[in-house]
Amino acid sequence: MDDAASHQITKLLTKWGGGDQRALDELMPLVYYELRRMARGYIRRQPDGNSFQTTDLIHETYIKLVRNEDQNWQNRAHFFGVAASAMRHILVDHARARHAEKRGGGLDRVSLSETMATVAIQSRQVLDLDDALKRLAELDQRKGDVVELKYFGGLTNEEAAEVLLVSVETVKRDWRFARGWLLRELEAENK
Amino acid sequence: MDKLRLEKIERIYQAVLDGPEDLRERLLADSCDGDEDLRSEVESLLRFENKDSSFIDSPPELLAADVFEGSSSELAAGDKISHYTIQRLLGEGGMGQVYLASDERLRRNVALKIFPPTIADDAESLMRFEREAQAVSALNHPNILTVYEFGEHQGVHYIATEFIDGITLRSSLLAAQPRPAQALEIAIQALSALEAAHEAGITHRDIKPENIMIRRDGYVKVLDFGLAKLAHPDKSTRTHSGSEDPTVALHQTKPGAVMGTAAYMSPEQARGLKIDARSDIWSLAVVLYEMLAGSRPFMGETHADIIVAILGSEPASLAEPVESVSAELEGVIRKALEKKAEARFQTAGEFKAELEAIKLGLGTKLPSTVASAISSAEKAAQSTAIMPDAPGVTDGRAPRATSDGREGNEPAHLSSMLSFRAVVSEVRSHKLRSAIAAVLLIGVASLGAYFALNIFRSDAIDSIAVLPFDNSGDPELQFISDGLSESLIDRFAQLPQLKVISRNSSFKFRGSDVDLGSIAAQLGVRSIVTGKVTRVGDELVIRVDVIDALENRQLAGGQYRRKGGDLLGLQSEIAQNTIEKFRVRLTDGQSRRMAERNTENSESYRYYLNGLVLLNDKDVGRDKALDYFQKAIDLDPDFALAWAEIAWIYLAQANASSDPDVQMPKARAAVEKALALDPELAKARVVRAMIYEYEFEWTKAEGEYRQAIELSPNLDFARNNYAFFLSVLDRQNEALAQLEEQRIRDPLNRRLLLLQKAIVLVQARRFDEALQAYQEAQAVEPSKGVPDFALGYAYAGKGLRNEAITYYRKSVADLGGEEKYSQPLVYLAATYAGMPDKRAEAKAILARIEAMNEYVSPALLAVVYTALSDNDKAMELLERAFARRDLLLRFIRTGYEYDGLRTDPRFADLEKRIGMR
């Protein structure tokens, strides 16, 4: 990424931190793009696709982004927030396409490797989870955020707490409840 | 479930889990206090607490790996997709990545768009898009991106398109706001694309600055027709836009986000209604508004706000903040932005026509830098003159101007080079160094549009351009690379079945990285021949490729290897191999000529090639070229082509000399030699025609011209000189027809052709049209301008003496002032002579000229005496001119300056003797 883009993202993060909601609208596509870009290099360094770590990717992207800018912990938190949300969209988009492929008989055509089968299952799960998560967020926005950060962004409890400006304990409890709630919803759906 | 209920459930849930494990059952019972529903809710949640879920407890990393690992990952330089080699990433848009790649088969650059797997998986939509994109591309419209190929390679779906060397309008807008005239031009070109697509029944659906590209030469290209449809195949069944533009996808699930494209949506599009061509008209009007105002007409903080603005609010006035936007233009934009489609322009063509009319008006109103540089005194003259004069233009070439003088060794006044010849010599002396710059000039290129439309539709190749061969950066090879390509042009020019672009136009693409498809479009040809000369040890490797631009495929490609610089037979071999692929039927004579080897002496051939290249190099010039041709015939006295070139050079020297009789016999001898060796040599026929003209043998001259054109219909200077010949015989329409024929073969040489046309129009006394042509010539290449003398002569003919005087004076000043004899000085005197209060000045100039101790053309001096109504003196001078075969005498039939003599029987008698009547 060039310095200009890096600078722009940092500026937008600061603006968003300062309460400018519009900054998020500009941030999202930028972060989305950067994540995708970073991911390619990231994947190349992993000979085995299984070792993909969402959290690593987001951290790497962040380090790359702010290399010339002030290391502001608030910006970092904001970035993680946006990045997790972007990851969610990336994965859901992909899963949706995968799923469409399955309905179209795409999976039947090829002999399924174990990985591919897992990917197919994960796609379905991610789609269902995304739907359930939307319902949860309507009832309790913060819990929705916690799940987004931890599940899609791969953040630790501490990082999630930083992003949401709550205690680590709160994150843990939110997760505990949200997890149960979501699993129940998914189970009900699959019956 | 509502929030309160959830809160309650959670409170109990958390309390139970916070308590000691063995007390959970009790805690639960106590907390629910008999509410069975509540209890079962909490219980149902608690069941999962101790259950492992590999799914939710770790991020979906396999899926993530799959996302990023898939074919959407970035390709590296050198990666191969089918027969394309990736060079670099150009950009990444909604519909995947776009790379600059080289097409190894056709050896050209392409833009390769790789579809993300999500799109590629939707075979049906992809096919629909493919059909539509091909249909639009098949329109072959210069403002529409050309699609070369849809393909699939190892599961990767791609589309190869024309590579545009330029930037998107979005990037352009970010860098600088366009001037109003530019903004209009961009809109007009884009509308031209839309017009063609709409007529073919195709709506773009996503017109925005990101989809409009501005090529470096000023061409506007509209991209991605139908792509929007691919992104939203069917909104009603697809609730999520998953497979499309990441930004769009994000924003559609992210309420409150500004969706880029929303700003350009028409009201009907924003409402999700059925849309048609008129929606594109709206979107383009938004783009135009943005270009002019620097901001969009419909803005809002959120997507929804923008939609509301589109549906309900009127855009802010343009005319107020932007000074140069007239009420008229504002009105046109408003009409295009009518909420109801029925109230808008109904076709892109209507919208375009309005903008064109406004742009025309804008052009004259805009203060041009050129105009402002002119002194205020001249500004007064300017106000009535339609031609702004470019400072620094000291071309001096003009109708009957003593043009070449300043550049050569001969003093200006001695030269009697005729204007047409001067122009023609400019045709021959291609300015190589400015060639590339010329291609980059905006404006030069926008005329290519003319020729690009479906002019060829047959199996056989009927039109070609030979581009200058590449010399691999080795200057020593230039005579081979240039010489070969030029002599190939000459060879192909002999085939009447083919339209062959003349050297002038095709050599403008020297070193250009414009892709071959658009070169073909600009030149209006179906096929392009390219070549490259490389040295490998003592071996020369010449690679030649022939491309069918219409079918996007290679017709032929081959390598020719020559050891020790022996180039013999190379040209004929290339010509034969190439022509074979054109599927044109050749007569026996033509086949023979294609196979002809010209000379059997290798060294002689090298001298010839060197001479050809030098002939085009203005700096070194003809004399040096003559040396080379001379050496060529010393080695091979039967080398007809070299003799023809020698004849041409002698003729040119004779034309530029005060005493043609010195060089003319040499020219005659050389041309007779050439024609004795090869009677079918068109170049030699032209030279012979011009010698006949000099001898006032008009019928013979015409016979030679006609033969030359028959032998080589594509030979530019045959037609140019024939046009000039026809013009002085007052056959103006035939002259114009010849120029028109030439225009088709030399599309990028528009300025010269316009100048020639203007000269003919002046002879035809169609002064307004002539001035119009001069104005166009000025506009085509403002840096070169139009010769002042030519303008003066046209104005004087029109009766606008003051304007004429202004231009004559400039020309006089350029040629050394009033103390020096020059053609414009004579015409200045003649103009004064026609004004009662200036006759004294006329006489003073005349006296000065006559006192000069040098040769003065009697035909010219006669012009002043005619204006002074001294017919006796005028006739005496003309008789003297006749005795000397003065080259300027041929203008007496058409020139308005001799009108005063027309009733004189002596004049009629002279005309008869000259053979003009």
Image (tube, rainbow, N blue to C red):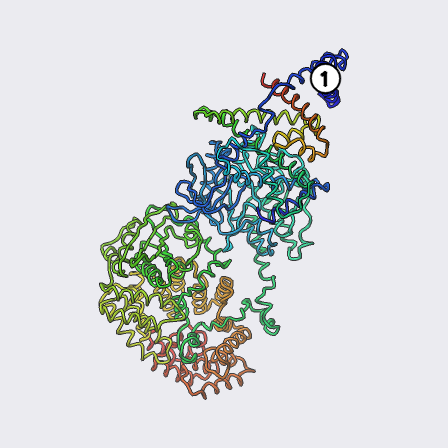
Task: Give whichever of B783, B718 is nearer the camera.
Answer: B783
Question: Could you tell me if residue B916 is visible in this image?
Answer: no
Q: Position of residue B35 (x, y in %)?
A: 75, 12
For label 1, count other residues whose C-alpha is less than 10 Å away and answer few (under 14), some (14-19) or many (20+).
few
Q: Position of residue A29 (x, y in %)?
A: 61, 40
**Residue B140 against residue B803 in the figure, above or below:** above
Say how many tags the image has: 1
**Residue B713 against residue B1 in the figure, above or below:** below
The amino acid at mark 1 is: Pro
Question: Could you tell me if residue B207 is visible in this image?
Answer: yes
Q: Residue at 42% of width from left, 49% of height from top?
A: B517
Quadrant of residue B745 within the rendered picture = bottom left
Label 1: chain letter: B
Q: Position of residue B443 (x, y in %)?
A: 50, 58
**Residue B121 against residue B818 in the figure, above or below:** above
Task: Give whichever of B351, B524 is nearer the camera.
Answer: B524
Q: Is residue A115 left or right of residue B618?
A: right
Query: Which quadrant is home to the C terminus of chain B?
Result: bottom left
Q: Position of residue B613 (x, y in %)?
A: 35, 65
Query: Which quadrant is home to the N terminus of chain B?
Result: top right
Identify the residue under disc 1.
B20
Tell me the element at label 1: loop
